[in-house]
Image: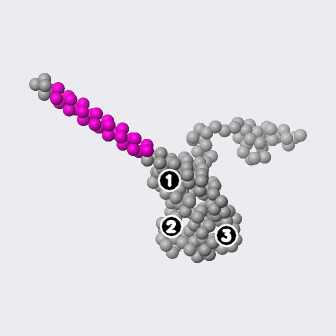
Amino acid sequence: MISDLADVVAACGSAIAVVVTVVFALRQLRSAQTANQTLVAIELLTRDRSSDEFLRAEDFVLNELTLRHPPPDVSVSDLPAEARHQVVRLSLYYNGLGQMLAFAAVDPRLLVGTVSYRSRQAWRVLEPYILAERAQRGETYLSHFEHLVHSATHNPWATAVRKFNLQRFGSYPAELGMNDGSTKALSRQHEVA
């Protein structure tokens, strides 16, 4: 009877040890996957975004596209080859980041903190071209790009700065227009003088 009880206790102990081992192995696997995905995101955010080709594409889209090929009713595929190349280069970059965001492959704070402003600028210019393309292809064209921008719009960086408890200086020069209350007196003193 006692040996049967000892066998049951030993079997339960072994089962618990197996469960604990499996739980820790799964956590380790998730951690490794997250680390790999974070490395891919960092690579995209640093190397690609600072490449000459990306910067040319961004400059073209933000400063020349609407002048050379005014919307509406111009889809991405209607653009001449060189303009289409620049638009696709920029769009696919942000679409790829949006895919990582949608599939939770990377911490959203990493993306919102690094591409929020620039992705919203690009979307503002490209939206009519993308919507015209969707009218031809279907509504999923560059949908992850839109998801990224939607997330950036509804989670503005200024809010994230406060939420993530990032450190900031107590005051800024008045000419920057970023007064936090502590520079009001300073700017008034300059006006009086």
Q: Which mark is residue 101?
A: 1
* Disc 1 residue type (three-letter): Leu
Residue 3 on the magenta segment? no
Relative to 170, is 113 on the left or the right? left
Vertical order, 138 against 2 (above or below):
below
Q: Position of residue 54 (x, y in %)?
A: 62, 60
Give the mark, 2 or 3, whose residue is nearer the N terminus: 3
Q: Which residue lies at the image location 65% right of the left edge and 59% below the top edge?
A: 52
* Disc 2 residue type (three-letter): Tyr
Q: Which residue lies at the image location 74% right of the left edge and 41% below the top edge?
A: 172
Q: Which residues are magenta?
A: 5-32
Residue sitting at the far right:
193
Q: Which residue is mark 2?
A: 141
56 or 132: nearer the viewer? 56
The secondary structure making up most of the magenta span is: helix
Give the mark, 3 or 1, whose residue is nearer the N terminus: 3
Vertical order, 85 against 102 (above or below):
below
Quick one: SS at disc 3? helix
Vertical order, 67 against 94 (above or below):
below
Residues tagged 3 and 1 counted as in contact (Cβ below 8 A)? no
Give the mark, 1 or 2, whose residue is nearer the N terminus: 1
Mark 2–mark 3 distance (CA, rounded to whole Å): 20 Å
Q: Position of residue 29 (x, y in %)?
A: 39, 44
Q: Which residue lies at the image location 10% right of the left edge and 25% below the top edge?
A: 1
Q: Which residue lies at the image location 41% right of the left edge and 45% below the top edge?
A: 30
Q: Which mark is residue 156?
A: none
Quick one: SS at disc 2? loop
Residue 26 on the magenta segment? yes
Q: Which residue is mark 3?
A: 66
Quick one: SS at disc 1? helix
